[in-house]
Image (cartoon, helix red, strand yellow):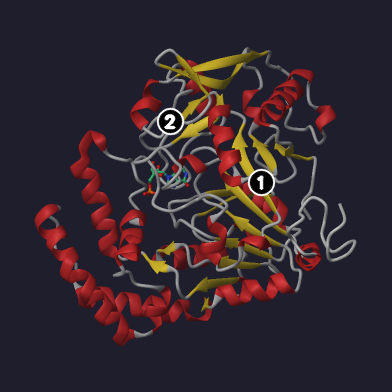
Amino acid sequence: MESPRGPGLFNRDQRHRPILSIERRLILSTLVVVGTQWGDEGKGKVVDLLTSRVRVVARFQGGNNAGHTLKVGGEQIIVHLIPSGILYPDTINVIGNGLVVDPAVLLQEKADLRRRGYFRQDDQLVISERAHVIMPYHKVIDLGREELLGNKKIGTTGRGIGPAYEDKAARVGIRMGDLTRPDHLRKRVDAALAEKNVLIEHLFKRPRPDANEILDQYVAYGEQLKPHITDIARILQEKLDAGVHILFEGAQGTLLDIDHGTYPYVTSSSVVAGNVCAGCGIGPMKLDQIWGAAKAYSTRVGAGGFPTELTDDLGERIRMTGAEFGATTGRPRRCGWLDLVVLNHSIRLNGLTGLVLTKLDVLTGISPLKIATAYELDGKIIERVPWDVNDLDRVVPIYKEFRGWDEPISECRSFDELPRNARHYVEAIEHITGVTCTLISVGPGREQSIIRESPF
Ligand code: IMP
């Protein structure tokens, strides 16, 4: 049907969008990479791989609860806070306003990276003046609360993430910009401590933090970080207008999302792709592609429902082969079969346009392989993740079985080189989810990747 404004003004598929905005989209190229499970899906490697094709890598939520393991030329580098693009000298790394930043961790990462020959220029990193700061009392509260919860504890990373986000919502948080204004910072810290000290002293039975000590330390952090602290939304908007390729790097995974995850066993931020906009200060129309990273099996650290968990020798085998120990806390990760109920949940919530399947090589030698396609709950078949974790604990996964393969696959560089059964496994995932596996990872190295579609 021709548009009332004449031919060509409206695109057939997007009839209500004027051509003007479509032309703008053509000069943009942004990609979001999020986790589709409980974190640790291997996003860091994928982001690192794609970073050679972008000029900006931005994080939009979380803090140093994340841990991205990057492998370059046999060297292993773990970053917790600084975006994965830091290994490329001409890439700008952005810490968005949606993060909570521990300045001590940030400075330590900067120093470590410099010592290893990376991050030579200050302008490789920009930090939002609006990002919130993790203060020493946040860590005391995080650990104190977990201790009080006893066997009901969340299993947090103990980094103060939750309490820092609580302060943001309670409007008593300290922001990165505050660190550069000592007088202002004193007032903010005094106000925050008036309340916190009661909790720390009387509920958690810990010594009161010393306000002067905190101030001296955090003013010093502010001085050291000043070259990086800026208006990141403006920088991103300028880069978007110039058509620069930007990669938005998610942390954690969709099942740890504060709204859509297995609440209360979740992190304290919104980890889904929709939060890129709020967490970096850009509009929703700027996001072109959204990829979700999924391990070829499942893992989880910390407590909370995990329907396909393997608590037997096979779970242990996957843990050892896949080196499934937390990059941040070193805790052994719980391991289990791939769960497509979870994956489909993430696909819907993030609007995924591609799947990045990681660690396929870890499944070599295991047969049969199982994939959960639905759950049974109280005699009913369900294909959705229940909102109540008590129900999630009770569901019985319904599995499809697949023949495994014995051939090593870490040297495969194209889909056709994979053994037939490995291809069938990938194709089954694509068939059931309706989303293409754009990238398949067959080992930790950058080169151990099968790139089937490139976003840039
Ligand atoms: P928090 O984010 O430290 O408050 O921890 C809350 C929950 O999220 C715990 O179960 C953590 O183990 C989990 N978590 C937080 N960050 C990550 C991550 O990057 N990978 C895996 N699990 C995480």
Say which element carries label 1.
strand
x, y (%) of residue 318? 54, 25
Residue occupying image coordinates x 21% and y 37%: 150
- Label annotation for residue 291: 1
Instruction: Give the x, y percent position of residue 251.
Output: 52, 51
Determine which quarter of the picture holds residue 184: bottom left
User: Which residue of the protein is positioned furthest toward the right in this rendering?
Assistant: 7
- The label number, if any, that marks residue 386 in the structure image: 2
| Residue drawn at point x = 29 percent, y = 65 percent | 170
Tag 1: residue type? Trp
Position in image of residue 316 (x %, y %): 48, 22
Instruction: Give residue 333's quadrant in the image.
Output: top left
Q: Within 8 Å of ligand 1, the CB of disc 2?
A: no
Using the rendered image of the protein, determine whether residue 122 is visible from the camera's viewpoint.
no
How far apart in space, not on screen, are marks 2 and 1 (Cα)? 24 Å
- 95 lies left or right of 386: right
Q: Residue at x 72, y 53 (%)?
A: 50
User: Amino acid under label 2?
Assistant: Pro
